[in-house]
Structure formats: structure tokens, C-alpha cells
Amino acid sequence: MKESLLVDKYGRQLNYLRLSVTDRCNFRCYYCMPEEGIDFAKRKDLMTFDEMLQLSTIFCNLGISKIRITGGEPFVRHGIMPFLHQLSGVEGLQEITVTSNGTLSARYQAELLSMGIRKINISLDSLDAQRFHYITRRDSFDSVYNGVFRLLDAGFDVKLNCVVADNKNIQDIIPFIELTKNYPLSVRFLEEMPFNGSDGTQVLSSWDYKKIYHYISEHYTDINRLISDANSTSVNYKISGYQGSFGIIPSFSRTFCGTCNRIRLSATGELRTCLYGPPVTNLRNLLRKGASVADTGQEILNAVALRQRDGYAAEALSNNSVNTSMSALGG
Ligand code: SAM
Ligand code: SF4
């Protein structure tokens, strides 16, 4: 892999950009935003697709080789597919992946495959329609669940993201793992994070990665640890004989910061070098002031140079009393 110029002072090379194309969503997952939604960005404040393309090109010149398209729900943004077509032609970009709530992704599956996008993460927190409704505040279980199998049938590499929380979906953990018996799915259990667009007083789930693993280990005797990519945020396992695998992501415990290779750009142009930290700069503003490619690249390099050692140090810099929604951060 090409060396990235984006290297922080702890020697971590950044080659993975998470690009949020919208802060809007057709779901209202309790852990992400309140029922009434959040103060969504005005249209004029959203980056245009042209701006996203310009910035993606600059990022790839600097060494980004993978871009994950996220949001909000990426497929609710009008014009997303033509943008992805253009993005797939950016020099140096080796892989585009998508994170979606799965309501609309199946509709676009042939087109995604035609441009070489075959890795998709679908958020699915329950295998029970009622619990799914309680979690997402939407009645779309059947279409999301059936959509997962349509994606698998079409040849996608599908990962399911499941945020684990008390009184919500503990009873789904084992059924999710059982789903990996006959399907080549990877189910990843995430710790809940505080990015829910509320006033910060909500009690977070007590299910950290240790508790999740302990619970699973009480149900299975044949759990095999898998060797994961160096930059993986999930610790991955497989039950002997099962087709798929499962992983646990310590998203709140933050045990993976030492190898983090990610940088995030929100739909309004805010650049974050850590999910837990404040935005370091706004690249949309820079472009709109007419900054050159070189100046914009330098701004990104400067931001990376200021990157904190880990999510705890980054959080200490953030004076957000209100917890920004993950939908606005670009999860
Ligand atoms: N709408 C798409 C989706 O749900 O997959 C993409 C954006 S969503 C913000 C990206 C991921 O962030 C999802 O897997 C979601 O479960 C996760 N997420 C959102 N808020 C979270 C929170 N407070 N704690 C942990 N994970 C969260
Ligand atoms: Fe929407 Fe994804 Fe947030 Fe759920 S987690 S509300 S699907 S952006």
C-alpha cells in the first residue's frame, strides 16, 4: 500500500476517510438522536457533491486509499449515486465502502456492484420486529432484514452493526451469532457511545466489550479468536463450523486508538481527527473562500499534526456540554 503523507505525531498513518454525505436520516435510533430529530443542517451549509469530490481528491493525493460513505443515512441524500460514480474514479482511491440503515441500500445494489462497491455495513440492532421498532422508532424491520439477505445473495460482503444495550436487545445477541451459522455474515456488537443529540444526561448502556464477551462465552465453548487487520476496531471471533463471524467493538472503551487510521469529514465540512474530539477545521469554509488545492492540503496536514494520542485526550479538548448526534458527526 502507498505510504500516506497523513502521519500524526504518534506515527499513525491515516489512510481511511469516513465521509458523511448528510446529517439527515429516515430513522430515529434512540442512541443516535431524539424522536423529534436534531437541528439538521440547512441545505446551504451542506457540502455540495462537487465540494466533496474536490476534497476527496485532495485526501487521496495525501494518501487516503479507502473512503467509507456514511451519514445520517447516505441513501436519503438526493444525487448520491451519481456522486459515488464520480468518486469511484478518483485516483489513488482503492476502496469505497458504505454504512447504511438498510432501508434503501437493496434498491441500489446492482448499481453499487457495477462501480465496484461490495462492502456494506448495515445497522441492525434486533432480530425482533417489535424491539427493532422500539430502537429505531420506525416500522421497517422486514425490509431491512430481508434486504440483508438480498445483499448477501447479490454478492456483497455484509457486516451487521448492533449497538448493545440493557433493556433493549440483550436477548438478540445469541440469535445474531446463530445467524452466522448458515450465512457468511459478520455481526459486530458495539458499545453505546454518548453521541445521541441529547443534553448528556441519558444513562448509557452498561454493556462494555468485556461484558458482551463474557455473556457470549457463557453460551459457547468453541469460540475462536480471528486474526484481524492491524487497524481493525473490532476484535473478531468465529464459532467453530459457522460460516460467518462476530466481532466486538469497544467504541466507548476506546482500546483501539493506538492503531487508529481514520479521519472524518462531516456533511458540513467539519474535519475531525478523532470521533471524540472537537472539529479541527472546516474544509467547506476553506473551499468557499477560494483556497487552493495546496492550501487545503496543508490545512489537512496541519490538522493531522494536532491529532491527540487517544479518544480520552481528544474528549478532554471538547467542551460540548450537549452530546452531538452521531448522525451529525458522521458515524
Ligand atoms: N445511518 C447509517 C447507519 O445507521 O448505519 C449510517 C450512519 S450511523 C450514525 C453509523 C453507525 O453509528 C451505525 O452503525 C450506528 O449504529 C452507530 N451509532 C450511532 N449512534 C451511536 C451511538 N450513540 N453509540 C454507538 N454507535 C452509534
Ligand atoms: Fe439514522 Fe443511522 Fe442514526 Fe439510526 S444510527 S438514526 S439509522 S443515522
Image: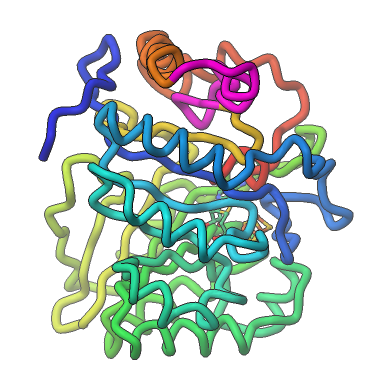
Left or right of 103, for residue 60: left
Residue under the point 78% across and 69% down: 137
Left or right of 90, for residue 20: right
Whether residue 276 appears in magenta in the rendering, the answer is yes
Query: What segment carries the magenta color?
Result: 271-292
Whether residue 257 appears in magenta in the rendering, the answer is no
* Quadrant of the drawing holding the N terminus: top left
- Please state the horizontal and vertical placement of residue 267, each as a whole percent of the image: 62, 41
| Quarter where residue 127 is shown | bottom right
Residue 284 lies, with reference to residue 243, above or below; the image says above
| Quarter where residue 109 is shown | bottom left
Residue under the point 26% across and 70% down: 245
Residue 23 lies, with reference to residue 85, above or below; the image says above
- Please state the horizontal and vertical placement of residue 22, each as a whole percent of the image: 65, 49
- Please state the horizontal and vertical placement of residue 279, each as a whole percent of the image: 58, 21
Residue under the point 47% across and 14% down: 313
Tell me if residue 251 can be seen. Answer: yes
Left or right of 20, for residue 68: left
Residue 143 lies, with reference to residue 104, above or below; the image says below
Residue under the point 43% across and 89% down: 150
- Please state the horizontal and vertical placement of residue 321, each as a whole percent of the image: 76, 22
Q: Nearer the viewer, residue 242 or 36?
A: 36
Q: Nearer the viewer, residue 331 or 167?
A: 331
